Image (cartoon, helix red, strand yellow):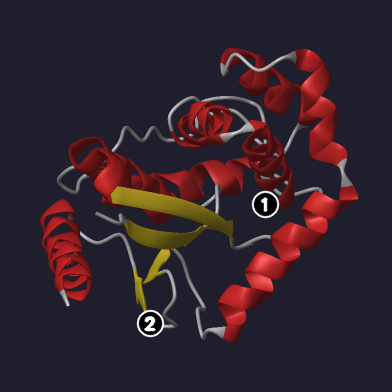
Amino acid sequence: MDPVHLIVYSDYLCPWCYSAAHRLQQLKEEQGEGLALEWRSYLLRPRPKPGRDLEKFMRYTQSWLRPAAEPDAPVFRVWQSGEGPPSHSLPAHQAAKAANRLGAEAFDALHPRLMRAYFEQSRDISREPVLRALWAEAGLSEETFANATDPRLVQQILAEHNEALGLGITGVPAVRVAGTDAFVTGAQPLAVLRRWIGRLRDGVLERQAG
């Protein structure tokens, strides 16, 4: 049976994207090869913004307690370090795309670490030393981190971001079924996602039977 193939537009600095990623990973573990997830970039902070106020940012992270209080939520912690705030979204996406070049296993090792580092561990994932450390923690070889500076990755990230805008996506997370232009936005509850994927799988079975 062909898997249900979902394309997920997401940003590593978005708390609701973290919730969505956590729930989709739970479903992936349940569904196995019956569910394929493809992560594409959406940039909430596309350009560097140096000099952002750390105290103001720390107050902003109080808002993370809202997604943290939802069922099936990952761990969120109000910012507790002197690092940051993150300057922009692009560096984390570059690292994730570079890992994906190494294969799905490498991407799957780094992708959740980027989000946990930001939302749970108060690490500034726009800084190269932090990204290098996460790269190593994911078990990826140090020399391959240089791939993250390839300008072609930036072009790919911007193309994915513009693709989302062209579809009418103005916020993330947004999930669409591959081969269609329809999308669902927001960190949907796990039960809702489970029912939706079940209906999509029924549709796949019907097409194959026909």
Measuring from the top left, give residue 72's x and y in whole percent. Answer: 18, 42
**Would residue 154 be seen by someone viewing this image from the given angle?**
yes
Where residue 158 sits, quadrant-wise, is bottom right
At label 1, which amino acid type do we have? Ser
> Which quadrant does the N terminus fall into?
bottom left
Query: Which disc, if any, is residue 89?
Result: 1
For the residues carrying marks 1 and 2, which lies nearer the camera in this image?
Answer: 2
**Would residue 63 be seen by someone viewing this image from the given angle?**
no
Q: Residues within 10 Å of mark 1 (few under 14, many from 20)?
A: many
Q: CA distance from mark 1 to mark 2?
A: 25 Å
Where residue 127 sits, quadrant-wise, is top right
Against 39, is 177 above or below?
below
Query: Which disc, if any, is residue 121?
Result: none
Measuring from the top left, give residue 194's x and y in whole percent. Answer: 15, 56
> Which quadrant does the C terminus fall into?
bottom left
Q: Residue at x 48, y 53 (%)?
A: 38
**Label 1 vs 2, first from the N-terminus:** 1
At label 2, which amino acid type do we have? Ala
Q: Residues within 10 Å of mark 2 (few under 14, many from 20)?
A: few
- Residue at label 2? 182
User: In this image, 75 relative to 7: left or right?
Assistant: left
Q: Residue at x 37, y 59 (%)?
A: 5
Measuring from the top left, give residue 18's x and y in whole percent. Answer: 40, 46
